[in-house]
Amino acid sequence: MHWPHRIPPLFRPALLIALPWLLAGCAQTSGLGYYWQGLRGHLQMLQAARPLPEWIASSDTPPALRERLQLAQRARAFAVTELHLPDNASYHRYADLHRAAAVWNVVAAPPDSLTLHTWCFPVTGCIGYRGYFAEAHAREHAAQLAAEGLEVSVYGVPAYSTLGYLNWLGGDPLLSTFVQWPEGDFVRLLFHELAHQVVYAKDDTQFNESFATAVERLGSARWLSTQAGPEARAAFAASEARRREFRALTRAARERLSALYAQNAREALAPEALAAMKSEAMQDFRARYAVLRAGWLAALDGAPSPAQIAGYDRWVAEANNAAFGAQAAYDGWVPAFEALFAREARDWPRFYDAVQQLAALPAARRHEALCALHPAAPLETLCARHPHPTPPPARP
């Protein structure tokens, strides 16, 4: 089952004008300058993209890149035939961006909450992050938010989705920012971005990102078990073990902070007391990470430290409410979606239909249904507000 986005030719020029709003959540710092950088940045990316067969056939293409683009072709076909992800123009072209990230996202949260600040746009709705094609512009906006008293985080994003709206322009391309990732991580990102073209719930970042994360996890597991070689499976298993342990660590820290902020909301703690308790929670988080990291390095037994560990190091060093809030958006509902996939007999079209039904519900009912699918969801979700949720109806 596929969900093509057919845009009538008459409306395509107007859509180009609207492009900055499409990119706003995934892409000057305010006003027209912000929208212009989104339009210009994406069009430059499209202009740099060439069809995969051209890159593969060119004698100028390095062998390692040629091999990876051939892998991308196989993974793209697998996404359609095995995962029933959209069969369209996306990820059939490649662009070398000559930079470290596709865009840089800015996220922000109050000093006493993990709830992300949101920005609202006509097409994407209200979302908890704002993207820039230039890191300097992202950091400029982050500084403005920090001056307003918010905690902010800026992080590079290797890819983003235009939700299928621009497949008539060639679709979203493969990018140099992630194409050389280890095989398992590469295919999971590809599946994640394609999942955004299947279902999108306006104004619900956590729903959208958790759904795509569930698809990437389930899809990459299928790929690795049927398509990858032993070396790729072993590398991914080690990477996934670290990722799983880190998720557990950060989830525990989020729950501790959430409980603290809930206590503050109830009791109006003195600012000094709140600051001390928050500092203690963060110090404990970083101490626990140091222990976890030491175990990772010991397991490597003298081998070079993977780049992922350096990424974890940076995240922990800069962790704050905004960083924790953004992370929650990517995995908060994942267990519920995985439970829904199992309930739908691991049938991809049935699963997507069930998710579309959830996306069509009002937000409160949608969250109730997700809580019913996985009552033990993390504290930062809305499950605490729905002690007796009603599960969504099962399909026959």
Image: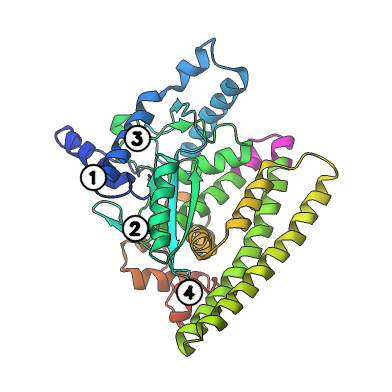
Q: Residue at x 51, y 12 (%)?
A: 58
Mark 3 in CB contact with mark 4 (< 8 angstroms) = no
Q: Position of residue 290 (x, y in %)?
A: 74, 60
Furthest residue toward top: 59
Q: Looking at the image, is mark 4 or mark 2 earlier in the sequence?
A: 4
Q: Give the residue type that dot 3 points to.
A: His
Furthest residue toward right: 301
Q: Residue at x 51, y 28 (%)?
A: 73
47, 110: nearer the viewer: 110
Q: Is residue 67 above or below residue 296?
A: above
Residue 327 showing in the rendered view: yes
Q: Which residue is mark 1?
A: 32
Q: Marks 1/4: CA distance? A: 32 Å
Q: Marks 2/3: CA distance? A: 23 Å
Q: Give the residue type that dot 1 points to.
A: Leu
Q: Write down the quadrant of residue 289 in the picture.
A: bottom right
- Residue 112: image tag: 4
Q: Give the residue type that dot 4 points to.
A: Asp
Q: Position of residue 188 (x, y in %)?
A: 55, 43
Q: Which residue is mark 2?
A: 201
Mark 1 in CB contact with mark 3 (< 8 angstroms) = no
Residues packed near mark 4 inside 10 Å, few (<14), some (14 to 19) or many (20 plus): many
Q: Position of residue 70 (x, y in %)?
A: 55, 24
Mark 2 in CB contact with mark 1 (< 8 angstroms) = no
> How was this image coloured?
rainbow
Main secondary structure along the magenta-highlighted residues: helix
**SS of the residue under disc 1:** helix
Tell which tag, 4 or 2, sits nearer the viewer. Answer: 4
